[in-house]
Amino acid sequence: MKLEVFLALRELHIKDFILIDDVTIKFKEGFNVLTGETGAGKSIIVNALNVILGERVGIDLIKYGKEVAIVEALFDRVDKFLLEKLNNFGIPFEQDLIIKREINKSGKNKCYVNNTLVTLNTLKNIGESLVDIHGQHEHQTLLNSTNQLNLLDSFAKLDDLKEKYRLIYNKVMQLIEKKNSLIMSEQEKQRRIEIINFQIKEIENARLKIGEDEELEKERNILVNSEKIANNIDKIHSLIYGEELTTSSLSNLQESLKRLQDLCNIDNSLEETFKNLQNVVFELEEIANKILDYKEKIDFNPKRLEEIEDRRDLIIKLKKKYGSSIKEIIDYGEKLKKELKEINQNEEEIEKIEKEILELKKQLKEVGLSLSERRRLSAEDFEKKVINELKDLGMPNTKFKLEISQIEKEDGLLEINGKRYEVYKDGIDKIKFLISPNVGEELKPLSEIVSGGELSRIMLALKVILGEADNVPTLIFDEIDVGIGGNIGKIVGKKLLEISKLHEIICITHLPQIAAFADYHIFVKKEVKNNKTIIKLEVLEKDDRIKEIARMLGGVDKEIALKHAKELLKSNK
C-alpha cells in the first residue's frame, strides 16, 4: 500500500538566480530525475533548494545585472508535526505551504512562509521538516546524532516508551528549575534576613500613623510663626476694644447703637436697622473673645518645636528609603514581613521538591535503562540490515556499527552502578553511526565520511531500511552515482524507486541506469540567448526521454544507444 506523501515539493520557481532568468519546475509524487550534460546547471537547482531551506547566501547568487533574486517553493498537504511547528511560529496554514526567499544586493534579504515574514533561523527550522538533501556538501539530517537516535528508536518502535520517558524527564527538569529559583546560598540568605529584620525594625520603631506628617507640618507652621500670630492678635484686639487714650471700634459701635435706639423711640421704622447693628456688636464682641482665647492657647514651646523637627526629619528619611507616603512605608513593612516568612517557608518547600525529584529520578532511571536496553537489542539487527543494503549498493566490504554510550558526569542527574551520568530529553544514551567503507580502515563516525558517493549510498541504504520512520517527505539525492558503475547504478535506481513509494524523490544523476527508473524526467540544458548564457528545463516524455537516455549511455553508434535506451526503459517498467 502506497503511503500518502505529506508536504511534498510540487513547484519550484526561480527568478534572476545565477544563470536562470525565470523558470518554474514542477515535480510529481514519486521518483523525479534531473539529467543533463556536465555543466548544464543541475547544481544550480540544488543551490536554489538550499536557499529555500534556510541556508545562508551571498549576493553572488543574484543574476548579473539584476538587483533581486527570488526563489519560491510550493509544498502541498501537511502532517501534524509540521502543523504544530507552524502554529508555534504563528504561521497561518490552510492547504498549501509557500516559502519565498528574496536575495537583495542591498543585503536586505527577506524570508516568507505563507506570506508571513520570518527569520532565517525559523525558515531553517521549518525547512528541516520538509526536504533532506543528500550531497557531498549539503546539510544532512542523518549526520546529526540526535536524528540517528530517533531513527534507531523508530526502527525499534520505541516511540511510546520514549514518550513516557520524556514526560518524566520534563517533570524532573521543571522541579529542578523551581528548586533552583528558591535556593540561595546560606550567606546570601543570612545577609537578606539581616537586612529585612533591620528594615522592619526601623519602620515599626517609627510607630507611623497615616496623616501624621500633615498634622506635624501644620503644628510646626504655627509654632514657627507664633510671635507673628501673637502680635497680630494684640493688634486686632486693640482695634476692636481700643487702647488707652484711644476710642475702640467696639465702643464707637456701642455709642452708635445707643443713639439708634433713641431714634427708634421717635420712629419705629428704624427698629430693623437697630437689630442688625445690635447683631454686629454681639458678633464683634464674640470675635474679640475668641481671638483672646486663641492667643491664650498659643504657647511658643521651643522644646515641642524641636520634637516636631526631629519627627519630621525621621519621616522624610523613611520616605526616601521605603516610599513616598506614610501609607507606602507601612505597606512596604508588611511586604518585608511576607518576604521573611517566605524565606523561612522556602526551606520546607525545597525539602518537599527534593523528595519529589528523588522519586521521579527513580522512575526516570527505570524507563531510561529500559530504553537503553531496547536500543541495544535492536542495534544488531539494524546493523545487519544496513550492511546487507550496502552490499547491494556496491560496498561489499563495509562495516557498520551503532555505538551506544552513556556520558559520565560528576554532577550528572542519575546515578547508575555507583557512577553519575548525564541525561537527555530522549534518554540516557548517546548514539553514533560508525562506518568503515573499505577493508583495513577503522570504524569512524558517519559524519567524517568524505566521499560523496559513499555517503549518498549509505544514506540510501538507511532510507530503504527505515522506510516510513523518516518523516521528511522530500528526499533529494545530488550526484548519487559518483564512483559507481552501470550495474550498481541499476541497483541504486531500484532502491530509489522503492523509497519513492514512501517519499518524494528528486535525483540528479549522470547514470542512465538510474534515470530509467524515474516516474518523471526533467532535462536541464544551457542555451546562449542575446549573447547571454541561460539555463532552461524541459520535461521529457516518450521519444525525447529515449534520446536523453541514449545520450547518457554514450557510444559511437547512435542506433545501438537508442535501442539500448528503449530496452532499459522497458525493463524498468
Image (cartoon, grey):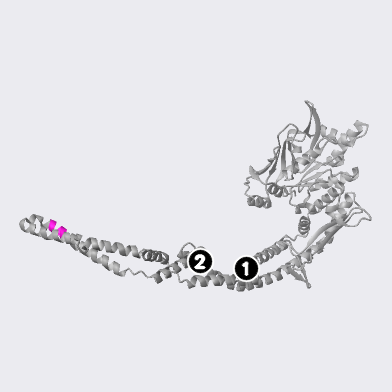
Q: Which residue is mark 2?
A: 332
Q: Is residue 382 left or right of residue 109?
A: right
- Magenta stretch, main secondary structure, is helix
Picture coordinates of residue 560, whole percent (x, y)? 92, 33
Tell me which label, 2 or 1, sits earlier in the chain: 1
Report whether residue 516 is seen.
Answer: no
The residue sitting at 8% across, 55% down in the picture is 269
Is residue 228 depicted above or below 137 in this figure?
A: below
Q: Residue lying furthest top in this view? A: 530
Q: Secondary structure at mark 2?
A: helix
Residue 415 lies, with reference to residue 69, above or below; the image says below
What whole-number distance in Å separates the C-alpha atoms at marks 2 and 1? 22 Å
Please name the residue that numbered disc 1 is placed on: 182
Q: Quadrant of the C terminus?
A: top right
Q: Is residue 51 left or right of residue 481?
A: left
Task: Give, as a single range, the part of the protein colored magenta.
Answer: 273-278
Q: Is residue 269 positioned above or below 526 on the image? A: below
Q: Nearer the viewer, residue 389 or 398?
A: 398
Identify which residue is drawn at 26% across, 67% down.
Answer: 292
Please, what is the three-letter code of the amino acid marked with disc 1?
Answer: Leu
> Tag 2: residue type?
Tyr
Report if residue 275 lies within the magenta region.
Answer: yes
Q: From this viewpoint, which residue is outermost toward the front? A: 245
Foreground: 531 or 10? 531
- At label 2, counting other C-alpha atoms closer than 10 Å, the crowd grade (few under 14, some 14-19, many 20 or more) is some
Q: How many marks?
A: 2
